[in-house]
Image (cartoon, rainbow, N blue to C red):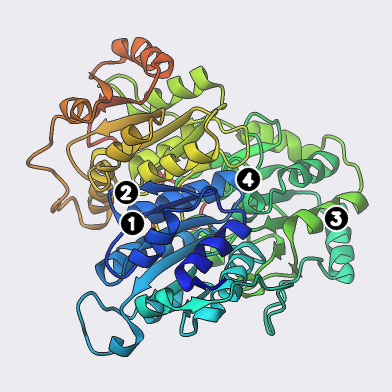
Amino acid sequence: MKITAAEALIKALEAEGVELMFGYPGGAILPVYDSLYNSKKMKHILTRSEQAAAHAASGYARVSGKVGVCVATSGPGATNLVTGIATAYMDSVPIVAITGQVPTSLIGRDVFQEVDITGATAPFTKHNYLVKKAEDIPRIVKEAFYIASTGRPGPVLIDLPKDVAEMKIEFKLPGKINLRGYKPKTHGHPLQIERAVEEINRSQRPVIIAGGGVNSARAEKELKELAEKAGIPVATSLMGIGSFPQNHPLSLGMAGMHGNPCANIAITESDLIIAAGVRFSDRTTGKVSGFAPKAKIIHIDIDPAEIGKNIRADIPIVGNIKIVLSEISKKVNHKESSEWHKFIEKIKKKVSYDKRGKLCPQEVIEEISRKTQGDAIITTEVGSHQMWVAQYYEFIYPRSFITSGGLGTMGYGLPAAIGAKFANPDKTVINFAGDGSFQMNLAEMATIVENNLDIKMVLFNNGGLGLVRQLQEFYCSGRYNQVYFKFVPDFVKLAESYGIKAQRIESREELPDAVNQMLSQEGSFLLECVVDINENVYPMVLSGSPINKMIGG
């Protein structure tokens, strides 16, 4: 019996094991939603914006290890997905975005809700499809999931015209995928691995920099084995947080612009860097010529385009990090404590802050870290609070820190927390936000309530855009422009209007009880912490400086 292409799409998604999708309906995507009505295997989560659907799919993918799925209609529905797709692309998150499109006979005529979404997203998708033949749907879906989840993960878009979705076809699942020109390399070159082993055995001051690729590849076990066997201290990028337990003696914490001083100093003084799944972004390296000037670089990455792009690589290894680290670990020599370890212990110190004034965001984060013992999934928006969470929450478990690193997307954290909670409903999920970011997607509180989700929200209310204000302090000679809000809503009443319990605190004396109440409260809870907008993020590496030249902290 023939079925419509829209029904074939649903069956193909079910065949890929999709259980959950996030989306927002509209005219051009109606055939897909009508077909979804009959699905017994998939649940649809109605978000309050298309962008939130993409972010929720991202949070779901990062926690579950599965491909996230989001759906939107044509025109503004599709363009509202763009920021979410670009966010996933920059952080190598596997999602499949499905958009409706106007009928094929009308494409290119500027009709109602028409936009060239495949053209718009080409620069920041791994691949995208404009479906022209209904019978291609099963193959396209299978290819999309394969491309999104293999090699360096990333987003794939499927644009489905309405008339194509309504055509009838005989449904048949395709066999094995074989894409010419797309053959991700998983095993590193044996000679390059031997060279890496020789350098590690010879090195006196090695440092591992673990990036988001370690989390994506689920290579935390192999990373830890290598670090412990060869006695190598481990720093992480922002996206690499959680890949190595921060309570481990070999942990250096986060490196980079707002990184831990001991991580930045260790990298600068090292004679060998083993970079695993790290992009060497400007926020990690600082001034390129001053980055690890005494060190040889071993760069391991699944994506050959990343190797040598920002930092020269003396020993490039293209392959799956989990496999490559395992091969290296088998062959390196076991090393005991050395002068390098003594030096590391000497420079280790906790980033400090001044507790003499008002309630500090840092102490709020430390209190929550102590109470949860790292056993929570933490999402963040983007801004000062994001950096403080990276500095002051002690992350112990992999994939427990979900944030927008590459694109720095404000409004990411709350919908990402929704996706994370669906991926792991038994885990405590906490979203940290500034009042600027929170107001970008606060309507997702409705999605939380509608689905009876237990998500804790910690809101730092400083009445403005704190990190932008800090940048204007240093780079604009203190000429502050458009960083102070003239109106701030009553966030407690706002949360309560959604049926979410909430509390506002303004002093450190209120903090312990408030955190206890939030964590013990059954159901979602918003804790608003009133803080000073003049509280800067330190340490800080100024633009054009090497990462060992930090101010503050």
- From the image, tell me which residue sits under label 1: 51
* The C terminus, quarter of image: top left
How many C-alpha atoms fall within 10 Å of the one at disc 1: few (<14), some, or many (≥20)? Answer: many
The answer to which quarter of the image holds residue 151 is: bottom right
Q: Earlier in the sequence, mark 1 or mark 3?
A: 1
Amino acid at circle 4: Ala
Secondary structure found at label 4: strand
Q: Which mark is residue 328?
A: 3
Would you say residue 251 is visible in this rendering? yes
Between label 4 and label 1, give the one nearer the viewer: 1
- From the image, tell me which residue sits under label 2: 411
Amino acid at circle 1: Gln
How many C-alpha atoms fall within 10 Å of the one at disc 4: few (<14), some, or many (≥20)? Answer: many
How many C-alpha atoms fall within 10 Å of the one at disc 2: few (<14), some, or many (≥20)? Answer: many
Secondary structure found at label 1: helix
Query: Disc 1 to disc 3, how far (Cα)?
Result: 41 Å
Q: Earlier in the sequence, mark 4 or mark 2?
A: 4
* The N terminus, quarter of image: bottom right
Query: Disc 1 to disc 2, how far (Cα)?
Result: 9 Å
Amino acid at circle 2: Gly
How many C-alpha atoms fall within 10 Å of the one at disc 3: few (<14), some, or many (≥20)? Answer: many
The answer to which quarter of the image holds residue 497 is: top left
What's the residue at 68%, 44% (across, down)?
Answer: 234
Q: Nearer the viewer, residue 108 or 438?
A: 108
Asked if 500 appears above or below 338 in the picture, the reply is: above
Query: Disc 4 to disc 2, how far (Cα)?
Result: 28 Å
Q: Earlier in the sequence, mark 2 or mark 3?
A: 3
- From the image, tell me which residue sits under label 4: 235
Query: Disc 4 to disc 1, how far (Cα)?
Result: 32 Å
Residue 132 horizontal side relative to residue 161, left or right: right
Residue 33 drawn at (x, y percent): 38, 59
